[in-house]
Amino acid sequence: MYDTGTNTNETKDRDMAGLWFGDFQIGQVFDHEIRRTVTEADNMWFCNATYNPAAIHIDAEYCKGTEFGQPLVNSIFTLGLVIGLSVQDTTLGTTVANLGMTDVTFPKPVFAGDTLRSRTTVLETRESKSRPNAGIVTFLHQGLNQRGEEVARCKRQALMLRREA
């Protein structure tokens, strides 16, 4: 179903996997269960799909001479994966739109073979001034590798549907 941002009866009455605006509490933490091992193919596909020819991502011979010794997984792929791993528990079917992402950092590199998991903390909630059927939630997403090291972090603002009474 295409979501036009309006809360039709069909949308209101359907069970959603994601949480509604009123379900989020400041300080709430989600340690998302789904993990994902990143492959070399993921990285190559993403770099090809986004036309990113940077040798640090796609040229293993070049990377042997870098401080990392191997290709780095594209950081935008990493960010997308970290947020994607959070969707089932938080926003699946209840998001109107992403409004922005800020404070994006990548404290540690990600390599093919790393297994990532995601943690989400609710930082802020506020009612939408322009949409009575929605509110804005600010999330902190953290990506962690198999050693528990933080590899990505960002704040994301999402316009979330309200549950009708």
Image (cartoon, helix red, strand yellow):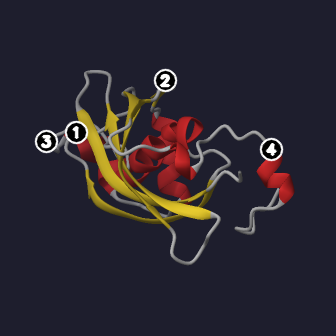
Residue 149: which disc?
none
Residue wearing tag 3: 67
Task: Assess whether mark 4 and mark 3 are in contact (beta carbons under 8 angstroms).
Answer: no
Nearer the N terminus, badge 1 or badge 2?
2
Residue wearing tag 4: 14
- Total label count? 4
| Label 4 residue SS | loop
Task: Assess whether mark 1 and mark 4 are in contact (beta carbons under 8 angstroms).
Answer: no
Task: Assess whether mark 2 and mark 4 are in contact (beta carbons under 8 angstroms).
Answer: no
Seen at 71% across and 41% down, the residue is 16
In this rendering, is residue 43 above or below 9? above
**Could you say where residue 25 lies in the image, as x and y percent from the top left?**
42, 43
Determine crowd level at label 4: few under 14, some 14-19, many 20+ residues with C-alpha closer than 10 A: few
Three-letter residue code for mark 4: Arg
Seen at 17% across and 43% down, the residue is 65
Q: CA separation, marks 3 and 4?
A: 51 Å
Determine crowd level at label 1: few under 14, some 14-19, many 20+ residues with C-alpha closer than 10 A: few
71 left or right, relative to 86 = left
Q: CA separation, marks 4 and 1?
A: 52 Å
Three-letter residue code for mark 1: Lys
Nearer the N terminus, badge 3 or badge 4?
4
Three-letter residue code for mark 2: Glu
| Label 1 residue SS | helix
Task: Assess whether mark 2 and mark 3 are in contact (beta carbons under 8 angstroms).
Answer: no
